[in-house]
Image (spheres, grey):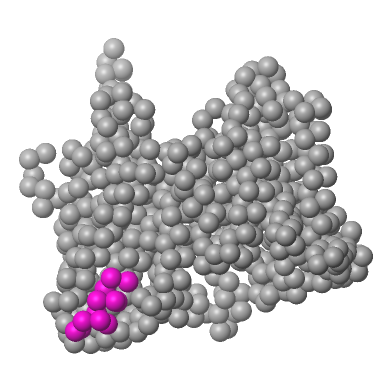
Amino acid sequence: MNKPILLSRSNIILFIIVLALVAFPFVMDSRTLTILVTQILIFGILAMSYDILLGYTGIVSFGHAMFFGIGAYCTAIMLSDFESTIGVFIVSIIVGMLIAGILSFIVGLLTLRLKSHFFAMLTMAISGLLLVVAEKWRSVTKGNDGFTFKAPEVFKDRVIFYLVVLALLVIVFIVLKRFVSSPLGRVLIAVRENEQRTKSLGFKTLYYKVIASVVAGVIAALAGSLYAVSLRFVNTSVLTMEITLDALLMTIIGGVGTLIGPLVGSVVIESAQHYLSGLARDFPIFERWIIFFGIIYILAVIFFPKGIVGTIQTKYSQWKIKRNQLDVAPLSKSKESSK
Amino acid sequence: MDLIISLVINGLATGMLIFLLASGLTLIFGLMHVLNFAHGGLFVWGAYAGVFSYAYSGSFIVGIIVAILTGLVFGFITEKLIITPVYGNLVQQILITLGFMLVLQEMIKVVFGPNVVAVKVPELLAGSWQLGDIIIIKYRIFIIFFGFIIFGLLHYMLTRTKIGLIVRAGVMNSDMVQALGINIKRIFLVVFMTGSALAALAGMLFAPYSGAIYAELGMEFAIMAFIVVVIGGMGSFQGSLFAAILVGLAGSFMAYYVPYLSLAVNMIIMVVVLIFRPQGLFTTAKG
């Protein structure tokens, strides 16, 4: 119990994984692989932010792409209009996060008082509206054609960008971990478990839900900014439902309410997407890899509602209990026999 | 004047198609609180199955029948395979039906090919009438009539037959109906299959109306139908007719007068309705 938290077993494992990830681009000198892993990490950030909503607060949002898109557009527009330096990049990330924060605050206040299915549809509608605005506002966004821009000079080296993304991911992970284990995060979990009860215990649940949605929105904007820089291109596809669905799939398949789960989900989905669409050359059926996703996803919702990480965690704790029982069992038996 | 009349006819025809889609959705929701995101998938399946059998047999009626049968079969499969395992869990229902929607949409591309399919209006309904300066396209009138006939039939079934009585009672309080010894789940299956058949029928009717069908159509129309269900009030059958006509008319007038707003107008209506009257305009069920 009094063990320093930093040295717990799971944290040591995480630390080793991070070290391996840092070493990875120097060991494997493959450009495509570095880009793929960068992509995985960026979507990992997005999926983690979605987990705050779905996993910890228990609300299904279909509008998460709008925050991601705002981040992407902020960075893209600022980098193409001003000089493309590191300074502008950092400022653009902060501006994107601010706008996303304000927007998610307003949207949250308006929508979170509704029940879950109304909320889901309303977020879908608002993010649809934003998509329409982006399509029509061609002078700024260039619509569906999108535009390319120069990334800061330093990021020409893919490895450096990869390391920056990795560092941000670690920071986001630690911050979110602290956030969900704070008293505030505990209230969010209570809202997920039983909102009525939490309300009757005297918590203003709307207030807590809005905080969760602001945090998730801000982090999603960060992921969007990184995504835009990694592609050096942006178009309206960053605002579409598909981004939200990706985040949703990653969170569900990885494991809701675990934070690690969405990262695992991001690894699974991004690499599957990469390799399955590669297979399409030999087997035409793989051009429709979304079908496999859909099926796996449905099966996951029915049979593994906790996802990969959640299932492992449950199995592990069951095994632990069983082991403890085995330790105790002979004792109780001997008591019986002595009677 | 002639302009307004043709815009009204346009709007009514679109509204009727959305109504066919939304009426099933609203009853499914009202009865079992199931939000079926896969409804749009049934719409496209109806369209594709109907159009292909229409092209194969050369008879529009065969196409309609095949579409309805497809809807019934898919409705049965969906209810048994997808909805039953997650009864009562709202979040999981949203997630799983969304996943099934993806599967349905991609399956279309596997079975019928990924290309846009062109559809011709059947000969009997092709062409238009000319009244003075007004040109009235026959097929649109046909859709409007067809829609009203379906509305009449459903209305009759809901208000005059025993199963309709059970369905209406179920929308008001399903636990009570169950307690009175009626297997509400079986009723729900029937409603679900009917709703799916209506969606498939809407798809089939839509195909010659637009002239072309493609797999992503389902999602677009499903969103429209959701908007209608929300505006009309979840579980309200008449509400969905009014809301569908409202959305159809708003869409067709906006497309003419303020084209850049036409995509957004329905979303705006829905946002306003949800914020100020979250239970919908015509709701009868509990909120």
- Classify residue B239 by image quadrant: top right
**Residue occupying the point 43% across, 66% down:** A133
Please give left or right for residue A133 compared with residue A214 in the image.
right
Per the rendered image, the range of residues in magenta is A73-84
Residue B7, image x, y percentages: 70, 60
As rendered, which of A83 and A64 lies closer to the eye?
A: A83
Q: Position of residue B203 (x, y in %)?
A: 73, 58
> Relative to B154, does residue B117 appear above or below in the rendering?
below
Q: Which quarter of the image is occupied by the C terminus of chain A?
A: top left
Residue A290: give x, y in percent of width and height.
54, 67
Q: Is residue A132 above or below residue A279?
A: above
Decide if residue A109 is in sight here.
Answer: yes
Left or right? Give the position of B14 relative to A75.
Answer: right
The verdict on residue A286 being magenta is no
From the image, which quarter does the N terminus of chain A lie in?
A: top left
Residue drawn at x 37%, y 82% is A147
**Residue A82 lies within the magenta run:** yes
Residue sitting at 62 percent across and 19 percent down?
Answer: B176
Question: Percent position (x, y) of residue B85?
Answer: 57, 41
